Amino acid sequence: MALFEQMRANVGKLLRGIDRYNPENLATLERYVETQAKENAYDLEANLAVLKLYQFNPAFFQTGVTAQILLKALTNLPHTDFTLCKCMIDQAHVWGTSTPPFFPEFPLALPGMQQEERPIRQILYLGELLEPCHFQSFWQALDENMELLEGITGFEDSVRK
């Protein structure tokens, strides 16, 4: 946890003022997201800054980092963190080259979907189950997608709180 606290202080300085949107700071912020995942810590403000930088600089988008941010936000339900995060993700990273469906089922795979888009789609699906309290379906879907939790410490316990 000491590494997280040290990074938190440094990132806090980065997030003040105009440096918040400097793409040169993206690598530091991405490492901070990974540290949050490993040390079971959470910093919404920093995570939103990463997603905003991805909006401004789509070429720098990292699926793995975005997945970690979404998973950490899921652990903070019923707060609105997950909704804030998912609204900042470009739909191209969710739906790929396919068009979003207009039916209630949330398909995990569509024709034209790139493999790197799949984790984001899976996490959004988990959120669609967890937000309305469909706990049994959530845990079943999570069991089928445990690879999403690689590198995320304490996810299951955090969701239960």
Image (cartoon, rainbow, N blue to C red):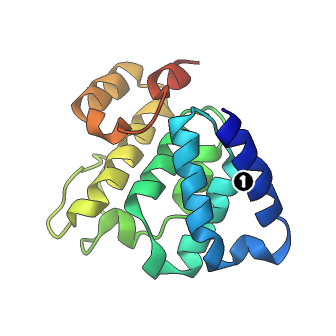
Q: Quadrant of the C terminus?
A: top right
Q: Where is residue 72 in the image (x, y as percent from the top left)?
A: 54, 40
Looking at the image, the residue that sits furthest to the left is 111
Which picture quadrant has residue 78?
Answer: top right
Please, is residue 45 above or below residue 81 in the view? below
What residue is shown at x 24% (from left), y 50% (from top)?
Answer: 107
Q: In this view, does 45 lie above or below 3?
A: below
Work out which quarter of the rendered image holds the N terminus and state it. Answer: top right
Q: Of the residues shown, which amino acid type is indicated by label 1?
A: Glu
Can you give x and y, in whole percent of width and height, for residue 7 in the image? 70, 49
Residue located at (41% from left, 21% from top): 135
- Secondary structure at badge 1 equals helix
- Judged from this view, the residue extending furthest toward the right is 17
In the image: residue 157, left or right of residue 105: right
Q: How many labels does the image show?
A: 1
When the figure is inspected, residue 150 is found, relative to residue 116, above or below; the finding is above
